[in-house]
C-alpha cells in the first residue's frame, strides 16, 4: 500500500480527515494528544517486515490538531542494512516548532508518534514528543524552552496512579549505565517522571542538567523497574542555530529484552527539507538481556 508522502505544511481539519480516509492508513486515533496515522503493512512484530531488507522506511504523516488547523509533526524513520537497523529517528519540520501551542510553565504537551513497522528489529515501539515550550522545573536549569523526543519500548498508556509504575525502583542495577543517576541525585536537579514513559536517569556531565543549558542532551527512562526508553533533548534556542551534535551513549550491562540498541544519538539540520533530524545510530545487538 502507498505510504503518505507530504510536504512540510499545515492542514485544515477537513484535509486531515480526508488524508486518513483516502489512504486507509493502518490506524488513526483522535484524542487529547491529537491524531496520528501509522504506515501500512503487516503487524509490528511480523519478522518478514525487516528480515534481509535494506533501505530507509518512513512512517505516515503525523498530524496534530491546533485550533482550526493541523500541524505536520513530521515522520519517524528507520534505516536497515540486510535487516539490521543503522538509524532510528524523527524528522521535525521547523514550522511545527513555530506553531505548536505554548503550555504553562512546568507543563508539557505530549504527542505520540508511531514508528514504521520495519523498526521491529529494535525494541522500540513508538516515539513520544514532550514539548516544554515555556520550560519546567528546576528553575535555572530546565526552565529554558525545550523539547524531548523519547523512543520507548512499552506501549503508550496513561500515567499510573501516583506515578507508581513510572517511579518503581530499578530491579537490576546492571540495566543502568555506569555513572547514570536518577535526576534527584544530581545537584540542582529534580526527579523527572513522565506518565506512561518512566523516570529519567541522567549522565551528570550531560549538558541538559547544567545551569542555563542551551544545547542537546540524552537520557534513559525506566518504567516498572526496567529500561523503557532513550530520550533526546534540545532547547528551542539550540535548534534555531541549526547545528549538529553527536553524542556517544553509555550502555547498560543487561538489556530489558533482545534486539538492537543504539550507541550514539544525533541532532542535525536538513536544510533541503527544513527539518530538524533526531536520530539514534550505531546499533549493536544486546549481549545480555533479561
Image (tube, grey):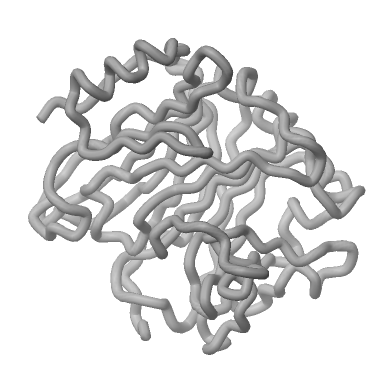
Q: Looking at the image, is 187 positioned above or below residue 243?
A: below
Residue 56 visible, this orientation: no
Of 240 and 226, nearer the camera is 226
Q: Where is residue 40 shown, x and y percent of the image?
A: 17, 37
In the displayed orientation, state which residue is furthest to the bottom: 172
Q: Where is residue 94 shown, x and y percent of the image?
A: 56, 21
Q: Where is residue 201 shown, x and y percent of the image?
A: 65, 69
Of 144 and 281, nearer the camera is 144
Task: Indicate left or right for 7 with 106 as reference.
Answer: left
Task: Indicate left or right for 118 with 221 as reference.
Answer: left
Q: Residue at x 90, y 49 (%)?
A: 139
Q: Residue at x 47, y 82 (%)?
A: 253
Q: Where is residue 162 shown, x and y percent of the image?
A: 67, 69
Q: Residue at x 35, y 66 (%)?
A: 284
Q: Looking at the image, is 218 positioned above or below residue 69?
A: below
Residue 90 visible, this orientation: yes
Q: Looking at the image, is 156 positioned above or below residue 233?
A: below
Quadrant (top left/top right/bottom left/bottom right) for the C terminus: bottom left
Which quarter of the picture shows residue 181?
A: bottom right
Quadrant (top left/top right/bottom left/bottom right) for the N terminus: top left
Q: Residue at x 53, y 29 (%)?
A: 276
Amino acid at each position: 500500500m502507498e505510504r503518505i508522502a507530504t510536504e512540510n505544511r499545515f492542514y485544515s481539519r477537513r484535509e486531515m480527515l480526508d488524508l486518513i480516509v483516502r489512504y486507509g492508513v493502518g490506524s488513526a486515533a483522535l484524542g487529547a494528544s491529537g491524531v496520528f496515522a501509522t504506515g501500512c503493512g503487516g503487524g509490528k512484530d511480523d519478522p518478514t517486515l525487516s528480515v534481509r531488507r535494506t533501505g530507509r522506511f518512513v512512517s505516515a504523516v503525523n498530524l496534530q490538531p491546533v485550533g482550526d488547523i493541523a500541524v505536520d509533526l513530521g515522520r519517524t524513520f528507520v534505516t536497515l542494512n540486510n535487516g539490521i537497523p543503522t538509524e532510528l529517528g524523527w524528522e521535525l519540520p521547523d514550522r511545527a516548532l513555530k506553531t505548536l501551542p505554548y503550555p504553562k510553565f512546568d507543563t508539557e504537551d505530549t504527542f505520540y508518534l508511531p514508528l514504521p513497522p520495519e523498526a521491529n528489529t529494535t525494541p522500540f515501539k513508538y516515539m513520544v514528543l514532550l514539548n516544554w515550550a515555556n520550560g519546567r522545573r528546576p528553575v535555572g536549569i530546565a526552565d529554558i524552552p525545550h523539547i524531548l523526543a523519547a523512543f520507548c519500548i512499552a506501549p503508550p498508556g496513561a500515567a499510573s496512579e501516583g506515578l507508581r509504575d513510572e517511579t518503581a525502583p530499578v530491579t537490576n542495577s546492571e540495566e543502568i549505565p555506569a555513572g547514570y543517576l536518577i535526576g534527584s541525585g544530581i545537584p540542582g536537579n529534580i526527579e523527572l517522571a513522565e506518565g506512561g514513559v518512566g523516570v529519567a536517569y541522567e549522565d551528570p556531565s550531560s549538558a541538559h542538567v547544567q545551569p542555563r543549558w542551551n544545547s542537546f542532551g540524552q537520557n534513559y527512562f525506566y518504567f516498572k523497574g526496567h529500561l523503557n526508553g532513550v530520550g533526546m533533548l534540545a532547547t528551542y534556542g539550540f535548534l534555531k542555530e541549526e547545528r549538529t551534535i553527536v553524542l556517544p551513549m553509555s550502555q547498560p550491562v543487561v538489556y530489558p529484552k533482545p534486539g538492537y540498541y543504539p550507541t550514539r544519538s544525533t541532532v542535525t539540520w536538513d536544510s533541503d527539507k527544513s527539518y530538524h533530524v533526531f536520530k539514534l545510530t550505531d546499533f549493536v545487538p544486546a549481549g545480555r538481556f533479561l
